[in-house]
Image (spheres, helix red, strand yellow):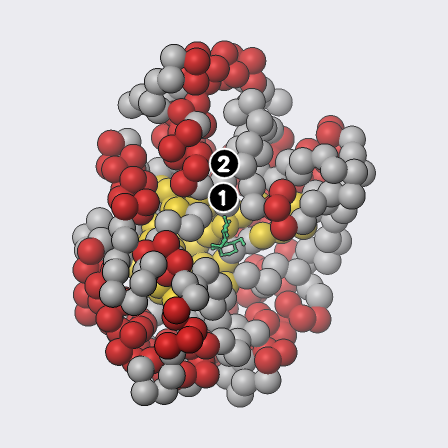
């Protein structure tokens, strides 16, 4: 097991005590050449993580670790409508630009997340969306935001979480203000406007709930594949699928064959695949840290091995890098009140078994050319 928590804790503590900004370069004593991104790169892939804006501003030690492990970053919230569109007439890019500046100074690539979602909408937006206004509102947003970041983003999550077969739509689309205002063509408008404005950013449909061999996820996988086929058939310029991979270490229905068939089916349509939001919740496991970490690592390894076996998968992003900060501690609290341990680094920025599982899975993955 590779653990460097003490040395890292000291390095990080020093940075915090001196109030030093996350200074350029990796934390002392840790080489980026040993990090997850370098390991991914040796297979033609990338590794990255989502960055929370408060961590970016306040936690210099955390941010110093980002370039060690990552070649790509994505904002947890700063590119969403709620942040960028405080009013119908105002575009506010300040928070997003803070991440862009950090990434530029560390030579990290950036994913844009996300142009269309049914959550994180400013209050004014659903109130104004209608069949009469929808196309103008959507196209204006996508055009303005994609133009603002033009040639600076590696990917755009053009649409996020659009599939929900239980909602009863014939195409398996989730019932959202976008679908209600525009019907399924909101997808076409978003992808086409993004392609016309910033053709160099890879255009991604990002989705969750496709990980396990349980009935609702089986339906969701099927609906997603059907939707992709219909988008391709009408030449909607989608280029890749993002698999969020919000995993649950207590879930026993992880079927590698099912998963591998699913990613291969996406690849066979000529689409790329990115693992976009990997984390593993442990809120249904007993308290013991060693057994929790082992279960999270084994689960990560099994899931990633099945997915990375497909050479169309170009990279892996985790939804955060260290257990210091995870949305899971807000959404799925443990009954015993203990914090969850869902990410590759622990709260002292030491590498956990999950880090080793990711490194091992990257090491056994076949080499690929697409990055
Ligand atoms: O982790 C994100 C959290 O900090 C935000 O408050 C929330 C709303 O903007 O979004 C969370 O990120 C979600 C992501 O954008 C889409 N997939 C699910 C993620 C976890 O909810």
Q: Quadrant of the N terminus?
A: top right
Q: Residues within 10 Å of mark 2 (few under 14, many from 20)?
A: many
Asked if disc 2 and disc 1 are in contact, CB closer than 8 Å, the reply is yes
Q: Is residue 233 visible?
A: no
Query: x%, y% of residue 286?
Result: 80, 38
Question: Label 1: which residue?
Answer: 318
In percent of width and height, residue 330 lies at: 61, 46
Task: Describe residue 167's horizontal placement relative to residue 215 as left or right.
Answer: left
Q: Residue at x 44, y 48 (%)?
A: 76
Instruction: Please provide percent x and percent y for residue 271.
Output: 38, 65
Numbered tag placed on residue 321 in the rendering:
2
Name the element at disc 1.
strand
Front residue of this view, candidates 193 and 34 = 193
What's the mark number on residue 345? none
> What secondary structure is found at the residue carrying circle 2?
loop
- Quote the CA–CA distance across marks 2 and 1: 6 Å
Q: Nearer the viewer, residue 81 or 193?
A: 81
46 above or below 22? below
Compared to residue 21, the image places residue 267 above or below, namely below
Estimate the x, y position of residue 91 in percent, counting from the top left: 26, 58
Residue drawn at (62%, 31%) of the image: 353
282 left or right of 98? right
Residue at the location (67% across, 71% down)? 216
Please tell me which residue is depicted at 57% across the width and 34% down the height of the picture. Answer: 323
Instruction: Tell which of 271 and 20 is nearer to you.
Output: 20
């Amino acid at each position: 097991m590779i653990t460097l928590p003490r040395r890292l804790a000291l390095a990080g503590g020093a940075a915090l005590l001196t109030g030093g900004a996350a200074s350029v370069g990796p934390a002392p004593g840790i080489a980026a050449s040993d990090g997850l991104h370098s390991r991914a790169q040796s297979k033609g892939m990338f590794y990255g993580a989502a960055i929370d804006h408060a961590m970016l501003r306040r936690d210099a030690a955390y941010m110093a670790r980002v370039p060690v492990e990552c070649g790509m970053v994505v904002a947890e919230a700063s590119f969403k409508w709620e942040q960028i569109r405080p009013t119908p007439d105002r575009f506010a890019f300040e928070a997003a630009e803070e991440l862009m500046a950090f990434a530029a100074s560390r030579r990290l690539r950036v994913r844009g997340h996300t142009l269309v979602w049914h959550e994180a909408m400013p209050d004014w937006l659903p109130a104004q969306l209608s069949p009469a206004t929808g196309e103008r509102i959507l196209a204006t947003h996508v055009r303005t935001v994609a133009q603002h970041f033009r040639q600076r983003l590696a990917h755009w999550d053009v649409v996020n979480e659009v599939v929900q077969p239980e909602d009863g739509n014939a195409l398996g689309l989730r019932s959202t203000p976008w679908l209600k205002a525009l019907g399924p063509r909101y997808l076409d408008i978003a992808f086409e406007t993004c392609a016309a404005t910033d053709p160099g950013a890879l255009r991604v449909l990002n989705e969750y709930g496709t990980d396990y061999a349980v009935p609702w996820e089986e339906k969701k996988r099927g609906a997603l594949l059907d939707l992709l086929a219909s988008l391709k058939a009408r030449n909607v310029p989608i280029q890749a699928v993002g698999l969020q991979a919000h995993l649950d270490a207590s879930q026993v229905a992880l079927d590698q064959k099912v998963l591998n068939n699913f990613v291969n089916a996406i690849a066979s349509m000529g689409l790329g695949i990115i693992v976009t939001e990997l984390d593993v919740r442990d809120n249904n496991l007993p308290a013991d840290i060693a057994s929790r970490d082992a279960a999270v690592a084994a689960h990560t390894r099994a899931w990633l091995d099945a997915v990375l076996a497909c050479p169309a998968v170009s990279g892996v992003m985790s939804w955060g890098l260290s257990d210091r900060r995870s949305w899971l501690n807000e959404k799925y609290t443990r009954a015993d009140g203990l914090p969850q341990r869902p990410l590759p680094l622990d709260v002292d920025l030491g590498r956990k078994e999950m880090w080793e599982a990711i490194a091992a899975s990257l090491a056994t993955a076949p080499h690929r050319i697409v990055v």
